[in-house]
Image (spheres, helix red, strand yellow):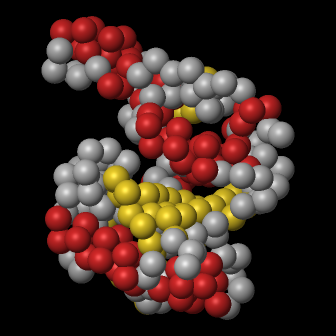
Amino acid sequence: MNRNKSREIAVINVSGISKKTWIGRALRWPLGLLPDGLQVPILQGPLRGYRWIVGSGVHGYWLGTYELQKQLVFWESIKPGMVVFDIGAHVGFYTMLASVALGDQGEVVAFEPFPHNVDFLKRHLAINHRRNVRIIEAAVGSRNSQGRFRTGADTSTGCVSDNGDLAVPLVALDDLVSSGAVQPPQIIKMDIEGGEYDALAGAKNLLAEWHPQIMLSTHGPDVHSKCLSLLQAMGYNVVPLYDSLESTDEVIALFQSQ
């Protein structure tokens, strides 16, 4: 078994302390002194000891506390030999989690359309010598086409939009799997800033035949409702990662066999 996968994981969740409190501000103040581009070790969590680039995203990545509960659930779900789709890979934190959890068996397919993020994604994989990852530089949608990508206030909030400032390819998961371009996944992590329903609509055949576990972040009540309806209609049991289905935007969908 992968050494990192088998060890007990204890994490102090500094990211869980609000920056609005004096202690939260005090804890975060030294982080601003670190220069962008510095390579640092990830301090705790499943990726402890791996390298990260300061300035590629929030400090919680290399502190090891970013989306703590979600990353631990994701980590524990992955078994060697699986195929994992990271849809909305950003700069590669969840891609790295999946890559390390898989060890020498299996593959991560990381989907990311924004070139700035793809550059950091590739650099994080290179400095950590991860070779079981395939990057698809495209957004995921309901069909194969050309689309527009609107950059956001930061590198994690860009999204597919008709009035986007960047031309990007759109790919449908059903087409990729049916053509043999990628192997069907056992786990899908999806966080694409409002494009979740379109991406799931373009994966109905995949979901019906292969029933992957889905870790889904939704953006907006309308998208949330439509995604839940689609998944439940296809035989999935959808449970909240936090709070209730109505109040959360983070869910886990598991197929219920008959």
Q: Is residue 96 above or below residue 189?
A: above
Residue at 44 percent across and 34 percent down: it is 68
Does residue 18 appear to the left or right of 74 in the view shown?
left
Residue at 26 percent across and 45 percent down: it is 243
| Image quadrant occupied by the N terminus | top right
Q: Quadrant of residue 5?
A: top right
Residue 202, image x, y percentages: 44, 85
Q: Quadrant of residue 213?
A: bottom right
Q: Which residue occupies the foreground of this view, 191 or 216?
A: 216
| Image quadrant occupied by the C terminus | bottom right
Does residue 205 appear to the left or right of 22 in the view shown?
right
Q: Which residue occupies the foreground of this view, 173 or 214?
A: 214
Q: Does residue 223 appear in the picture of this structure?
A: yes
Residue 214, image x, y percentages: 49, 63
Q: Which residue occupies the foreground of this view, 93 or 225?
A: 225
Count of marks, rendered view: 0
Residue 49, image x, y percentages: 67, 24
Q: Which residue occupies the foreground of this view, 254 or 130?
A: 254
